[in-house]
Image: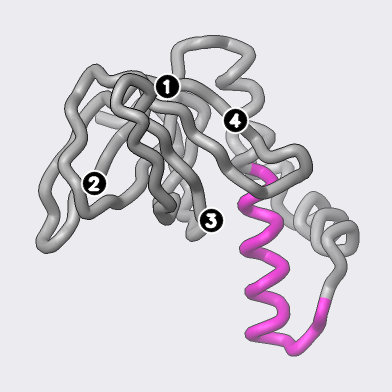
Amino acid sequence: MRHFIRHPSDIPIECCITHLGFRRQHCLKDIGPGGLRFQTHEALQQGCVIQITIPVREPPFEATGVIAWCRRSNSHYEVGVQFSDENTEFSVRMVEQICQIHHYQKEVLEKEGRLLTAEEAAAEWVAKYAQDFPT
């Protein structure tokens, strides 16, 4: 059973397996305060330390985590990364909100034809959804 509410995301991320020098671009699938999930074409070993970079702001968000699980799913693998540090969990929470605002901005453009700046999207998203965002 999940301990955290996850939210879908399609933000590109970069992952580096520390001891292998493995660095690849992936697509973030969900993010939550305890960790994140992404897809890859390679199986990754549970327990490996992984450096995650998410370019949703400047400077990009960077965090170190541990591969909690890796499961085959059709032609790719789903990988779960767990963060254990409190500061990292707080930062991931902020990144999660930024991801939600990016999605809101895209959705408004697609559905309503309105092009919002990042600031306008953030203000609207906060007014509409912040009270429902899990704490």
Left/right of residue 94 with respect to residue 74 in the rendered view: right
Q: Element at badge 3?
A: loop
Residue 121's spot in the image, x, y percent? 81, 62
- Comparing 71 with 50, the one in front is 50
Q: Amino acid at mark 2?
A: Glu
Residue 78 image label? 2
Which residue lies under the disc numbered 3? 11
Vertically, is 21 above or below 123? above
Rounded to the nearest angstrom, the CA distance separating label 1 from label 3 is 18 Å
Q: Amino acid at mark 1?
A: Gly
| Circle 1 residues within 10 Å: few <14, some 14–19, many ≥20 | many
Residue 46's spot in the image, x, y percent? 19, 24
Residue 33's spot in the image, x, y percent? 52, 28
The magenta span reads 97-115
Which residue lies under the disc numbered 1? 65
Mark 4 or 2, closer to the camera: 4
Rounded to the nearest angstrom, the CA distance separating label 4 from label 2 is 20 Å
